Amino acid sequence: MTPNRTPSGASHRDTGFTLVEILIAIVLVGILSAVVVVGVGSLTEQGEESACTASLDAAKAGSIVFFAQNAAHADDFTEMIADGALTVPSDVTATATTLSGQGGSWTLTLTPGSSGAAPTFACS
């Protein structure tokens, strides 16, 4: 049996990949996968922060609408929702003083104002 000849005239028997080449490729794919996972994790955090900030803005606007309709500030979220001043999506859980994102990834808290003052809102 004669060995295969390459165009340059050198001979070789196998044209497949060596074990070392395959291991290097697997390691490179692993490193790239780790970089992607870390990148996606930070995007998820940014999304949760944006969701809380958007809910904060909506709650402030709802508070203003409630005040315009009732000449008094709302003491809790359920009051604003019942009045129609604030609408929450189905994946948001509402209690009297908190709105929570899906899975509790963020929480918006309402603190009623004292002596008729406007409530304050905080994201966490």
Image (cartoon, rainbow, N blue to C red):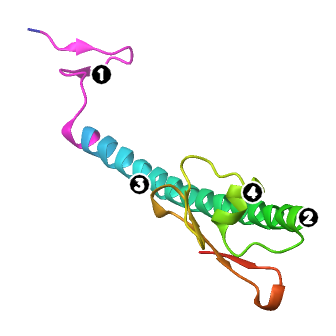
User: Which amino acid is tagged 4?
Assistant: Asp
C-beta proximity under 8 Å, tags 1 and 3: no
Which label belongs to residue 88? none
Which label's residue is closer to the chain start, 2 or 4?
A: 2
Q: Which residue is mark 4?
A: 83
**Decide: marks 2, 4 in contact (CB < 8 A)?**
no
Q: x, y (%) of residue 52?
A: 65, 64
**Vertical side of 35 occupied by 116: above or below:** below
Q: Are marks 1 and 2 in contact (CB under 8 Å)?
A: no
Name the mark nearer the viewer: 4 or 3.
4
Indicate which disc residue 34 carries.
3
**Mark 1 or 3, which is nearer the eye?**
3
Residue interval drawn in magenta: 2-21
- Report the mark closest to the observer, 1 or 2: 2
Q: Secondary structure at mark 3?
A: helix
Which of the two discs, 1 and 3, labels the residue nearer the N terminus? 1
Task: State the residue position of label 1.
Answer: 10
Quadrant (top left/top right/bottom left/bottom right) for the C terminus: bottom right
Q: What residue would you read off at disc 2?
A: 68
